[in-house]
Amino acid sequence: MTFEQLRIFVAVAEQQHMTRAAETLHLAQSAASAAIAALEARHATKLFHRVGRGIVLTQAGAAFLPEARAVLARAERAALTLAELGGLARGSLAVCASQTIAGYWLPRHLVAFRRAHPGIDIRLCIGNSAEVAAAVHEGMAELGFVEGVVADASLRGRPVARDLLVVVVDPAHPWAAGAPVAPEELVRSDWVLRERGSGTRSEFEAALRGFGLAEGALRVVLELPSNEAVRGAVEAGMGATALSASVAAPSLEAGLLHRVAIAMPERDFHVLQHRERTLSHAAEALLAQIMGG
């Protein structure tokens, strides 16, 4: 088994398509197909089902995927260790962040870091908070930035910034007039929320519990996978939502949304790292810049 075979296997598993995987790796499709075939033959195990023009992981392939990713991540960290002997002149840094953080808070820090260390390539993946935690757990990212606290004993989290959730509605909604809204009145509106697993959803549900509202008390008519989709649905009059103040700001300024007069708790943005992995010099430098800025 070679690192190249593992690299091709992971790419095919993620793309679920041999040609697209080969293109991402700048290989001929025949080379990628041959590598997968050799891996399957060597271990007498089918890793993919061929379904139409696409491919999907077999049960064995799904079990092998996290192991392959972990091996590649360890090899990359070994290479980075050698590169870092010259300081921060060159290298790479894998970071993962939730949508809210990646879209509205983190970019300015990444730009400042890149200007200070132009030889460090930054790779950013975006997901909900649960996906970010999984990326750090599996070694796909050194640092993960999420809203709220993640329940994973293998990860260490610490606050790096403060944020505020706000409840917003469209201008025609009864709550847009500005009169105070009591917590018990929240059940009277339809709601559009992020999917379960997102930090925004988790923090809002924690706030509801603080108000004494049971889980499931709200009429959730839409669950959507991005802040922009949620914001657009509420602008169109679908109901109320809770978003980061940073996400809601452009629509509030444009008059497309109105902030509801109900106090919501502040929340922390947290950075996650694996307890058993030593941070690279690049990751330490990024954290130092964020904490100092």
Image (cartoon, rainbow, N blue to C red):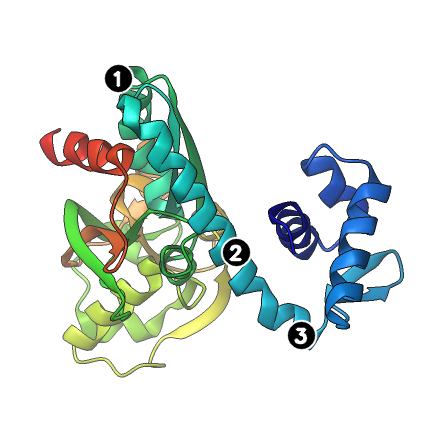
List the residue tagged with mark 1: 116
Foreground residue among 215 and 58: 58
Q: Quadrant of residue 95?
A: top left
Q: Nearer the viewer, mark 3 or mark 1?
A: 3
Q: In this image, 23 relative to 136: left or right?
A: right
| Residue 40 at least partly seen | yes
Taking the view exactly as shown, the residue that stands out farthest to the left is 292
**SS state under label 2:** helix
Query: Which quarter of the rendered picture does the N terminus lie within?
Result: bottom right
* Image coordinates for residue 242, horizontal then vertical, percent: 31, 57
Q: Quadrant of residue 101?
A: top left
Q: Is residue 44 above or below residue 178?
A: below
List the residue tagged with mark 2: 69
Instruction: Name the amino acid, label 2.
Output: Arg
Q: Mark 3 or mark 2, which has the lower sequence index?
A: 3
* Image coordinates for residue 164, horizontal then vertical, percent: 19, 49
Q: Which mark is residue 60?
A: 3
**SS state under label 1:** helix
* Image coordinates for residue 283, horizontal then vertical, percent: 27, 38
Q: CA distance from mark 3 to mark 2?
A: 15 Å
Q: Are marks 1 and 2 in contact (CB under 8 Å)?
A: no
Q: CA distance from mark 3 to mark 1?
A: 44 Å
Q: Quadrant of residue 85?
A: top left
Q: Nearer the viewer, mark 1 or mark 2?
A: 2
Foreground residue among 260 and 47: 47
Instruction: Name the amino acid, label 1.
Output: Ala
Residue visible at 30% across and 66% down?
202
